[in-house]
Image (tube, grey):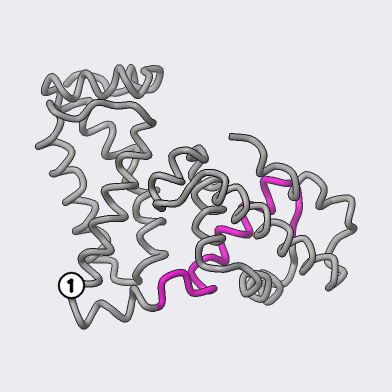
Amino acid sequence: MKGKGKFDCWSDRELWESIASGDQFAFSYLYEKSADALFGYGHKFSNDRRLIEDVIQDVFVILWEKRQRLTIHHSLKFYIFRIFRREIIQRLQGNKTLRQGLDNFMEESSWEASIQEVLIQRQMTIDSDRHVRESLKVLTKRQREAIYLKYIEGLSYDEISALMDVKVPYLYNVVLKGLKSLKEYFVTHGIAHISRFVPLLFFWKGA
């Protein structure tokens, strides 16, 4: 069997060119590299594990079928997430039983681990899970998703704006206001000294 380790050092363009030429090993590598992140993102839309897994499978069927027509201008993660977001929303909207999951999209409970991870990345920890849950209530749904995509999944502002169908300047504002709201919540509740939030307030600038 051809080793998959070589793909680790390939650029997205090189990987996609190999997939476009029919390389199933490269395609399998992309699936294995992306599946966990997609599952985590899908959990923000629905708690239905089978639904999320089905949509992930659909995403890769679509990618394989379109491999010779799709030209990569962004990261592969962007294309995968964009297809996944479209497909899972369509599934949820088209099924009355599942629609409640979409109505509850971005409930605070589904984002607790994500915001905790953002804080850990900034060398900040919060002992109380209650404070994490309460802090999420100060964020809008768009703020939660934008911050998640930027700082957990590492997408660029251009990619997130295309994925969420918003303008980049608007997205900057969404993220900045979200980070300011988090900072104000933590400072108000005496969770950390204000100086520790300076990086959190300004790390949104990195694209």
**Mark 1 — residue?**
94
Q: Which residue is drawn at 68% across and 51% down?
A: 120
- Local crowd at mark 1 within 10 Å, few (<14), some, or many (≥20)? few
Given residues 62 and 163, the one toward you in this image is 163
Figure label count: 1
- Look at the image and give the residue range highlighted in magenta: 104-125
Verify whether residue 200 appears in magenta: no
Given residues 188 and 178, the one toward you in this image is 178
Quarter of the image for the N terminus: give it. Answer: top left
Give how far across and how far down residue 76 sits, in percent: 34, 33
- The answer to which quarter of the image holds residue 207 is top right
Q: Which residue is drawn at 23% across and 72% down?
A: 93
Give how far across and how far down residue 125 sits, in percent: 74, 57
Q: Which residue is drawn at 55% across and 58% down?
A: 114
The amino acid type, in three-letter code, at marker 1 is Gly
Give how far across and how far down residue 39 sits, in percent: 35, 55
Q: Which residue is drawn at 11% across and 23% down?
A: 22
